[in-house]
Image (spheres, rainbow, N blue to C red):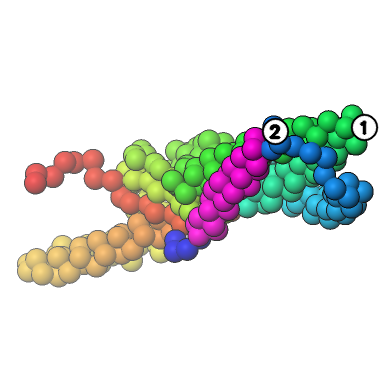
Amino acid sequence: YGYSKERFVWSLISAVGIFCLGSGATIVHGVQNLWIAHPPDNIEYAALVIGGSFIIEGASLVVAIQAVKKGAATEGMKVKDYVWRGHDPTSVAVMTEDGAAVTGLAIAAASLVAVKTTGNAMYDPIGSIIVGNLLGMVAIFLIQRNRHALIGRAIDEHDMQKVLHFLKNDPVVDALYDCKSEVIGPGFFRFKAEIDFNGVVVVQNYLNRTGREEWARQFRESAKEKDDSALLKIMSNYGEEVVTALGSEVDRLEKEIQELVPGIRHVDIEAHNPIDLPS
């Protein structure tokens, strides 16, 4: 809970900036120069700048690809699936931005070569338009990825089924209701469920831990009393212990769910009331 989704907000703002300033401005500049284009001055210096930028951006791209591979391995996903459905779009954003930069530099270099070879200056603005469209596609992809992260999408179906299968096969669980999950941060999830507990199993587990002989003795002795107060006191104590035992079962289920899917940081389990109470 808290500010774990804040990085998605900044990634979304960055993607919008790429779309408006990077893509939009580049396309507009290219279109404006289509009919008034002239060969750029000092084309050799431009080539040196492109070459140096290509080396720097290429090195950054290699690091970003390694980070994406590491993230995919952590979540047990293929790199392709992680790019589209991974829980942390931050590393994917860096990789796609660096990939677009390297590709854009290659397009710019090809445009300069075409201008130098043919003498036709229109290849320069055409290259700008292509680069602008490339940035636009990258920006739209990043906007969608961060949008999905912000609106609270559910965890992967595979992980959800693992949790549901575990709960359905636990002896204390009779039935499941209203099971939901939500991504609350990069690789962090919240899971909630309403459970109809098997009271017989809960009591049996409690008595197996504490021993039933002492409770049986207290009930027999209090039943012999003419006054019901002793019996009511024993029943109240026993009921309180059973409620505590139910809480222990909830804690156990929550702990085992988090061990089953480590990304689930918050588990909310509520006891389901199968009887509709009158309002």
Most frequent secondary structure within the magenta stretch: helix
User: Which class describes the residues within 10 Å of circle 1: few (<14), some (14-19), or many (20+)?
Assistant: few
Crowding at dot 2, Cα within 10 Å, few <14 / some 14-19 / many 20+, comes out as some
Judging depth in this view, the residue of 37 and 211 nearest the camera is 37
> What residue is at 14 percent from the left and 65 percent from the top?
232
Q: Is residue 9 above or below residue 120?
A: below
* Residue corresponding to mark 1: 117
**Could you tell me which quadrant the N terminus lies in?**
bottom left
Residue 242 on the magenta segment? no
Tell me if residue 120 comes above or below residue 43 in the rendering: above
Describe residue 4's horizontal placement relative to residue 69 as left or right.
left
Query: How far across and down, in percent of the image, does residue 110 sit?
Result: 85, 36
Q: Secondary structure at mark 1?
A: helix
**Residue 9 percent coordinates (x, y):** 50, 55
Q: Amino acid at mark 2?
A: Leu
Q: Which residue is denoted by mark 2 in the rendering?
A: 34
Examine the rendering and report whether any part of residue 46 can be seen. Answer: yes
Q: Amino acid at mark 1?
A: Thr
Q: Position of residue 204 (x, y in %)?
A: 38, 52
The range drawn in magenta is 5-32
Residue in the image at 14% along x and 70% along y: 230
